[in-house]
Image (spheres, coloured by chain):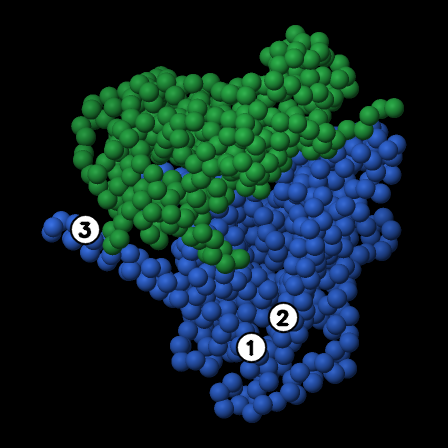
Chain colours: A green, B blue
Amino acid sequence: MTLSVQGLHKSFTTDRGAVRAVRDVSFTVEAGRFYTLLGPSGCGKTTTLRCIAGLERPEAGTIEIDGNVVSGPGRFVQTHERDIGMVFQSYAIWPHMTAFENVAFPLRVGSERLPRERLSRMVEEALALVGLEGLEDRPAPQLSGGQQQRLALARALVRKPKLLLLDEPLSNLDAKLRERMRVELRDLQRRLGIATIYVTHDQGEALFLSHRIAVMQDGVIVQEGAPRDLYGGPASGFVADFVGDATFVTGPAVASGISAFGGTVRCRLAPDVGTGDPALLVLRPESIAVRTEPAGKPNEFAGTLRIAAFLGDHLDCFVEIGDVLVRAKVHPGTQLVRDQKVWIEFPAEHVVAIRDDGWRPRVLTRTFDDES
Amino acid sequence: MAAPDLATRRAGSLRLPALRVDTLVLIAVSLFIAYLTLIPLGMLVLGSVSEGGVLGGDLTFRHFARVLTDANSVELLMTSFGYSLGAAGVAFVLGTAMAWVVERSDVPYRNVWYGLALVPLIIPGIIHTIAWLFLLSPEIGWINAPLKALTGQTLSIYTLGGMIWVQGLHEAPLAFVLMSAAFRAMDPSLEEAAATARAGTWKTLRRVTLPLLLPTAASVILVLFVRALESFEVPAIIGLPARLFVYTSRVYTALHQYPPNYGLSASYAMVLLGISVMGLVAHRILTRRSERFATITGKAYRPRRVELGRFRFVAVGVLVTYAVLAIALPFLVLLYSSFVRVYTVPTLETLGSLTLRNYAYVLEDELTRRAILNSIVLGVSTATAVVGLTAVIGWITVRSRTPGRGILDFLSFVPIAIPGIVLGISLIWVYFTIPIRIYGTMWILLVAYITRFLPYGIRSTTAGLVQIHKELEEAASASGASWWSAFRRVTLPLLRPALVAAWIYVFIVSLRELSSSILLYSTESVVLSIRIFDMRDSGQYTAIAALSVMLITFLVILVAVLQRLGGRTVRES
């Protein structure tokens, strides 16, 4: 076990009084794993990361890195004495140094004085790791955004720390570059096998990169698990909404599903949902088929197609059934016309209903008037 | 067991002193700044209502009564306001016209004009004023000689109009800087929207651009007004011979009559301070309102430039005229005068007998040499003290979470509201009263300069610190650097340009300081601006010219270095 966080608490005093940023957060990260803290802004994920780095002083709780308590009752190890590497959201590349000097800095300020050749070799290895060889003498401000990002990563890795901390490192890159960097980041982490804590609000990044994800809301971890488990079995409306796209349908649970769309929707029921309980059906867009004729299958419901937008790899459809707008992603070759009558259909085993905790996503809820 | 215990104790003992040092530094610095700013103001209030000295003097309101009900008090008020409003108006019209042409029209050589518009900022006010004496004196002015030959009439600088013109011309670059920033910060799509609504160039300017700029324009005029009100050079050098009195010159004459009337002087200073504070409060309210008027953002836009067509020559003509009046003529007249024996309108004969005598005199004169030395010593000390103090204050207000740092920030901005001459009379009261015997020495000048220029230093260092992203320091800690190592290897190198710029700037303004020094100097602690002021009293105009040419050359070199270092322009506000 490389990292253990137990019972972490941290609050801030602001103009409007105390804000409890992190409340009783506990988790562990095994060696070599990629662990993501996922949540909207203000959920406490960055504060948790900064506590691990020692940039914030927690009020309560214990943090252990590689078996050493770095923060706990009566004990607080300063940031510079922790065995970590960190990449900041702004990259925090020092503009008055060259690429080489930026990466050499962690080796130079360490207690151990390294011989010159050894230092250069380590810096060059770190730069090669992120594909920046040959740019050693480039002044840092002359590097592109993507290069600065890699440089920050090289600087965090050069000391070969036990733990790598990443604070939304991809959020300042443009969309194309972000996608490329996450491929490289995943590959690099899997190759080095370094335990990594990653903070992001982007669920796509979290699913792509992580072994495990902790979803945070209002300073609390609300669900933790492998990407597949979170997506397929959200523990709450918030998690279902935050991880992946979903249309929510409400209705009372019945024996084999829930009562909605003017009939019975067959689906899996979460373990804590009993018959008669208010339930929330989570419809993922990719599990829904849209047809112009009924196919006579179970879980088939008629509706009106309101939007069918061509996005290249799929058609983004919104089907109005009663007062619900159901989102579906269908094959781009499907021939569909706006305002026509359609049937949606989904297999019962791919759809889950969870306990209705009152959470409602901010999605398109307006219903459309028929042109007449 | 022993190892964790040791570590615990070390962590614990590290934490408490760190907090205490923080707070102690905050308290010490706050007390020092309060000593610099609040004590003089308190003493000024006491002094204005005391008979004789502050301690043991009887309470009296007769000075105030005299200031407010004197037969001349209405005249004084009218002259002060007329002069200040007039100068603000001249500066605003000149500065805004130039700013519009440079920022919003397709005038050629934009960068050249931009630089030229700022050059007059470098010339000290006292030199600018004396140069205009050379140009517009009724008998010997360069401009008046040809004017008389042509029209038989002359213009006199010794009038209210003359005072307004000289002060307005000198403050125009400030209006230019502030207004061009406002033009640049304006979203051009607001004007483009007007154009799509079929409004022409002039209609857009009149109906959209100018109304949008109104709050900014009002605040700029207020700043110019307060600066004119606080100015001492023009009221002393032109106003006193012309017997045109404003508040600053009254503070001065009340002390320079026989016997000096300190209470009366303090009362004039109180009125001046009151008007100045009201002006700055109004400015504050206005700028806050214009910030809420969210059309003008801090973002830099690519401006929409108006095509001038055949008006281009008019625009260039205006800019050239300004450059001639504000830079070329004053400098040429000084240059010429510095090489002649007796100042006259240039003729072939005088041009044939140029001499270096004035330079030799200035460099050999005992008092002038002392003034040069004193000014440099004071400039270096003031700049070093201000930069050191403000680096600490800046770090506390920007980076630390110490409670009470807001008070410190406020205290260090108080001096911006105190006119130089008011600070001068206040310090006289302070050091007449408290048993620190520095009156008449360089120390009192140093105290005055540090107080006056503290706000400029604060602005530069906090702006520098704010620009250094917090994560740059945190990244150093995360890389294993201790606090000191991070400060030395990351924060300080990144802050250095801001500190150097602040140092040079404070050095320059210290060299030109006149309005506080005039009340605080002695023959031992004479400084450059005072020496120029005194040489004018004794009619040594050609020597002044030589000294001015040397000083301007030195200042231009300094500003060039400053530009090179920071890539930023010298701005006053």
Q: Give me the chain letter of mark 1.
A: B
Disc 1 is placed on an element classified as helix
Are discs 1 and 2 both within one chain?
A: yes
Task: State the separation of the CA atoms marked 1 and 3.
Answer: 55 Å
Of badges 2 and 3, the one in the foreground is 3
Which residue shows up at 60% across the image and 78% down it?
Answer: B266
Residue A211 on image: x %, y %: 37, 25
Amino acid marked by disc 3: Ala
Q: Quadrant of residue B513?
A: bottom right
Tell me if label 2 and label 3 are in contact, CB under 8 Å: no
B483 and A82: which is toward the camera: A82
**Chain hosting mark 2:** B
Q: Residues within 10 Å of mark 3 (few under 14, many from 20)?
A: some
Instruction: Say which mark, if any, is on residue B273.
Output: 2
Give the amino acid type for the residue marked by disc 1 in the picture: Leu
Kindly identify the residue that appears in the image at 57 percent across and 61 percent down. Answer: B416
Going 81% across and 56% down the picture, which residue do you hit? B154
Q: Secondary structure at mark 3?
A: helix
Is B206 drawn above or below residue A167 in the view shown? Answer: below
Q: Is residue B146 visible?
A: yes
Q: CA distance from mark 2 to mark 3?
A: 57 Å
Q: Residue at x 77, y 82 (%)?
A: B71
Q: Which residue matches tag 3? A: B7
Q: Are marks 1 and 2 in contact (CB under 8 Å)?
A: yes
- For the residues labelled 1 and 2, the Cα–Cα distance comes to 10 Å
Q: Which residue is mark 1?
A: B44
Chain ID of residue with mark 3: B
